[in-house]
Image: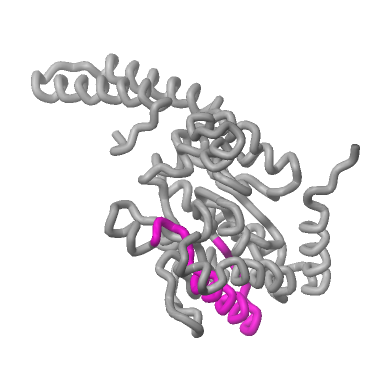
Amino acid sequence: MNKQTLDFEKPVAELEQKLAELKKQSEERRIDLASEIASMQAKIDATRTSIYGSLTPWQRVQISRHIERPFFLDYIRMACTDFVELKGDRLFGDDPSMPGGLATIDGIRCVIIGQQKGRNTKENLHRNFGSPHPEGYRKALRLMRLAEKFGFPFVALIDTPGAYPGIGAEERHIAEAIAVNIRDMMLLRTPIVSVVIGEGGSGGALGIGVADRVLMLENAYYSVISPEGCAAILWKHRKHAPEAAAALKLCAPDLTAMGLVDGVIPEPVGGAHCDPEQSAENLKQAVSKELHALAKTPIDKLLDQRYAKFRAMGVFEE
């Protein structure tokens, strides 16, 4: 059973507990309970499929924040080979919340960067809870230019509640760092693929999110503001976060329908944290497919398509 059980997962957790008790009784008393165990397992599978087949936007947000969900470095370990981390922005320092470097994905050598969270207090303090400082975005820009120089595609894995809003970050011009990244990614003369693997919060996500192909994991979210932040502004209380999540249209199906996301990467039933290896394999195959397709497009045409893609966003008629 997962250490963190979300409210809507409790029916499955209770059945799993009963299943564990049945197995224990079978072993301790040497009783053949195979049929009962099989029946309970089938019930668990059916319940899980039912719950995860009709998730609300707020439930998907909760899954995207699950403490056992694979993070950037987990995907590096499971989906990439030959990873060599490159540190520092050559201007101020290194930002542990935005690791990156050289890696190979399914035989394709590339430059990869992403936001990294922690699983406990010590790790979260080191990684700044996945909220990058300005030097993180400037390091990302340095690696983008490195990719362009050597003709490597650039891959970004997004997982942040937002860029760090502290005084130090403001003093070192966090908004300018993000703006420069957005501008230069639009002009970067190499294929770019970005994947939202968990939280995709505001400009913190967009700072490494301008790409030829924008993908999302099935239970990730991508939004201009968090549901809690939206609820605090519109309803004056965070308890309305579920309503805000529904109104923001921040999940993969809605974003795909609006043309803001190019593809959805499926997750195992129960979420990526239930089978990290399968989730990593799905991500590797999806990124590899896009990189192979983009490699066939002339770079000038790729830049024109990238520009047109983002200029078309937000257009509407009355």
- The residue nearer to you, when weighing 312 against 189, is 312
Snapshot quadrant of residue 290: bottom right
Magenta segment boundaries in residue numbering:
128-156
- Taking the image as drawn, is residue 109 in sight? no
Quadrant where the C terminus lies?
Answer: top right
Q: Position of residue 31 (x, y in %)?
A: 14, 16
In this rendering, would 94 be left or right of 310? Answer: left
Residue for point 60% across, 78% down? 147
Quadrant of res 182:
bottom right
Residue that sits furthest to the right in the current view: 318
**In this rendering, does residue 85 appear at all?**
yes
211 to the left or right of 198? right
Q: Residue at x 47, y 65 (%)?
A: 167
> In this picture, is 40 found above or below 176?
above
Picture coordinates of residue 235, whole percent (x, y): 58, 31
121 lies left or right of 306 = left
